[in-house]
Amino acid sequence: MFLPWRLFRERLDEVCPEWVIDYSEIQYLGNDAICRAGITILGVRKEAMACVPISVLSSNGKEMTRGSAADRLAAKVLKNCGEVWGIGRYIENQEFTIRYLWERRQELDDQMLGELQRLIQQYKISTGASSKPKPQPKTEPSPFTKPQTGTTQQVQQQPTADLYPANNGVVKRVRTITGHNPNWIYAQCGHYGYDRPAMMPPEDLEKLVCDMCADFAFSVGTAVNRSGALTSIQSALNFAKESGQPIVDAALMWLERHQTVSSPR
């Protein structure tokens, strides 16, 4: 789950207002800006490094970065130091994470339950326990329990809920420029294991938005190929997240730079 750098700073201010951060001189290697920083809390210092591109060009040669490399680097290294201190750290042991959250699922809100369900299905697919995402039965005692065979007992399934209704507005705004029809959008949702945009968590919605933007740029001829357009829009959205900007605003700005007269879909 993405955490903006401002959230790291706010958490540090909340826990220990006396925290301080120091930075090394910025080193420039090719198109990369690199520095090291350390956060000191109650006399204990932990450090990390960060690297950001100085310039990111779109497929047609337009500059995609906003703000100076130094500002972006300062935000990135603050996040990396925060992770060293245990703020927003990614847990690689997925089974442990699933079991821990599953045992405490009664304490989770609807959004986190949706995230847990998605994590369970992704884990099952990656380990070969399931070929495609399926609804989690209400009576299932564990997220890793294998289905029983040779029984005629009907298991009541959880209804498929729209946990992210705001996604519809995001897709609608992007679609006003790209012109994609609903069938195309639903097909892309299916590619990621969902029926519709309102079921998709933020990271998968971002993939859908990238697909729409890249397909549009290639279709109207402002991108040489879809893969190049996809790399370009992904870079634009990643930078927007680093800056705390909504991805839909960044996507619309990117589309404006690639917008020409297009044929109806």
Image (cartoon, helix red, strand yellow):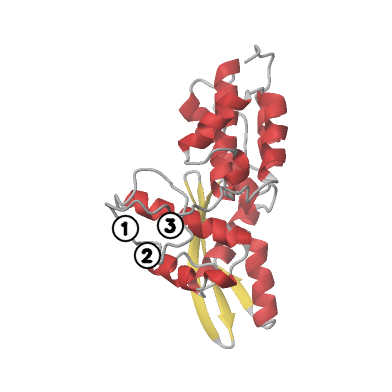
Q: Which residue is mark 1?
A: 146
Residue located 72% across and 27% down the image? 176
Quadrant, the N terminus: bottom right
Disc 2 residue crowd, few under 14, some 14–19, many 20+, Cα 10 Å: some
Total numbered circles: 3
Q: Vertical placement of 165 versus 79: above or below?
A: above
Give x and y (percent) for residue 178: 65, 24
**Residue wearing tag 3:** 120
Tell me: 237 left or right of 124.
Answer: right
Mark 3–mark 1 distance (CA, rounded to whole Å): 13 Å
Front position among marks 2 and 3:
3
Label 2: which residue? 95
* Tag 3: amino acid: Ile
Give residue 223's position: percent from left, percent from top: 55, 22
Q: Residue at x 58, y 30 (%)?
A: 185
Estimate the x, y position of residue 119 in percent, counting from the top left: 46, 56
Residue at disc 2, secondary structure: helix
Q: Nearer the viewer, mark 3 or mark 1?
A: 1
Q: Quadrant of residue 208?
A: top right
The amino acid type, in three-letter code, at marker 2 is Glu
